[in-house]
Image (tube, rainbow, N blue to C red):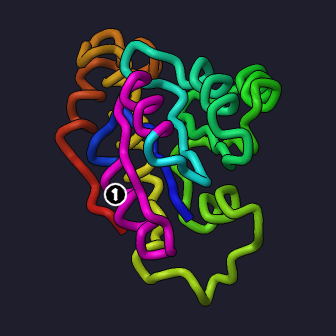
Amino acid sequence: MKLLIIEDDINLANTLARRLNKHGFACQLAHDKAEAIGIAKNFAPTHILLDMKLADDNGLALIAPLRALLTDAHIVLLTGYASIATAVEAMRLGANDYLTKPVDMLTLLRALTGTCVPTTELIADDIVTMSPERLEWEHIQQVLHTNQGNISATARQLNMHRRTLQRKLQKKPVQQ
């Protein structure tokens, strides 16, 4: 199985590739729209994992060209900004599945393969659950990134005091 991971967060893309390689996927990475189309033409993936927000681009705009290029590819849209409207639009454009971040490996494998993956086949690294503190910290980081590092705008968006946000940012919880 050949998988094209289209994700602008390089660390996340590398982590996904490492984990999915362990489950039998040969992975290629693309970080923007132009690179994704070029790799898709040459690599001809059977599966595509597509992030909805790619720097200044929208992953939704990539679904139709990828579907036209690779009619049989299994396309999964992955997003941190889930809504019913975008899920419907993704499916209308040709995505096979729609997942929200953070996503566990079992759910991701089920979406990519379209089958039930027995938990006995999962690798110990894949069965990691986040603590509520870690999940909150990850969400704060995502909103902070969206606001281009602006603490005040992030605090307003999260409906918390700026100093409280700064204290939470200093206490990065360990991965559990």
Residue 90 rendering spot, x and y as whole percentages: 72, 28
Query: For residue 40: magenta?
Result: yes
Above or below residue 7? Residue 73 is: below
Q: Quadrant of residue 170?
A: top left
Instruction: Tell me if 8 is positioned left or right of 121 in this view.
Output: left
Would you identify the image quadrant in which residue 161 lies?
A: top left
Q: Label 1 belongs to which residue? A: 15
Name the secondary structure under disc 1: helix
Magenta region: 13-41
Q: Is residue 11 above or below residue 23?
A: above
Residue 165 higher or lower than 122, as above or below: above
**What quarter of the picture does the N terminus occupy?**
bottom right
Position of 158 relative to 8 (above/below): above
Identified at 57% across, 28% down, the residue is 81
The residue depicted at 76 percent of the width and 25 percent of the height is 93
Instruction: Using the rendered image of the protein, determine whether residue 127 is visible from the camera's viewpoint.
Output: no
Q: Nearer the viewer, residue 131 or 42?
A: 42
> Left or right: where does residue 2 sit relative to residue 17?
right
In the rendered image, residue 62, in percent from the top left (x then y), is placed at: 57, 24
Residue closer to the observer: 160 or 120: 120
Of residue 146 and residue 98, the one placed in the foreground of this image is 98
Under mark 1, the amino acid is: Thr
Residue at 82 percent across and 25 percent down: it is 92
Label the magenta part by its dominant secondary structure.
helix
